[in-house]
Amino acid sequence: MKRVTLFAGHYGSGKSSLAVEYALKLASEGNKTVIADLDIVNPYFRSMDSRTELEHKGVEVIVSPYAGSNVDVPALPGEMYRIVDDRDYKAVVDVGGDDRGALALGRLSGALKKENDYEMILVVNFLRPLTRTPEEALQVISEIEQAGHLPFTGIINNTNLGELTAAEHVYRGLEKAERLSRMSGLELLGSTVKQELLRDIKTNGVFIPIKIRHRADWAIF
């Protein structure tokens, strides 16, 4: 567990959902926890749908005042610097959905590297249009790293079709994620799967029950 955990990936990857779940987990374990949307260029903090729940369970929420609007303001609110300035907190960061969305990360990358207590996780859904293949996902990694000036440290495979997800989708996504791991040199940290599919999935991994926003119960292994 690092002090700062950043979730990044292309739009529709599920990074916001996983960021919310991780923040709630940290808070439930007694950590002072803050979650921040770092996508300042295109601020659509979908996790704001869970803001009431997050704050009720002790998670502080930092978001651009322009989130959810059509205003395009590439500015970093001063409160965002608490991610690196206040080390009493466990911080969870929802990075922008593409290279433009990750631009603001560059303003924090120096401090994050200096502290050297962060994890930056690529969340990838191989059933989304722009990440159908490991090669496309590798390009996303390169673009976000260049824009945010911070290297990824791991991968979570979140390949799914929502409630239409079948075991074969999980297996195909896992195979592609393993290829991406070999191509990128990044560790594959786990894969998500619907709870009802657990009996159909054969793995030596350990399953951790989670709940994805606006879906039924899922698990990560």
Image (spheres, rainbow, N blue to C red):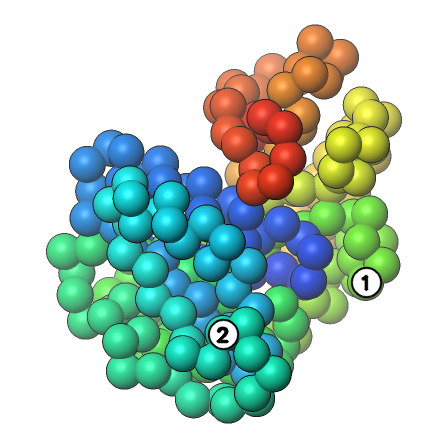
Provide the residue designation for mark 2: 67
Residue occupying the point 76% across, 32% down: 163
Pointer 1 or 2: first along the chain = 2
- Disc 1 marks which amino acid? Leu
Q: Residue 84 carries which label?
A: none
Please indicate, yes or no, whether residue 5 appears anywhere in the rendered image.
Answer: no
Residue 130 — which label?
1
Query: Total of numbered circles in the picture?
Result: 2
Question: x, y (%) of residue 41?
Answer: 55, 83
* Of the pair 106 and 194, the residue shown nearer to us: 194
The answer to whether 195 is drawn above or below residue 183 in the figure is above
> Looking at the image, which is closer to me, 179 or 71?
71
- Disc 1 versus disc 2: distance between alpha carbons? 24 Å
Q: Where is residue 190 in the image (x, y as percent from the top left)?
A: 57, 35
Q: In this view, does 179 lie to the left or right of 35?
A: right
Instruction: State the SS at label 1.
Output: helix
Quarter of the picture holding the C terminus: top right
Secondary structure, mark 2, is loop
The image quadrant where one finds the N terminus is: top left
Q: Residues within 10 Å of mark 1 (few under 14, many from 20)?
A: some
Label 2 neighbour load within 10 Å: few <14, some 14-19, many 20+: many
Residue 16 percent coordinates (x, y):
54, 54
Q: Are marks 1 and 2 in contact (CB under 8 Å)?
A: no
Rendering coords of residue 91 (x, y %) = 31, 56
Q: Which residue lies furthest to the top in this view?
A: 199
- Three-letter residue code for mark 2: Ala
Residue in the image at 34% along x and 82% along y? 77
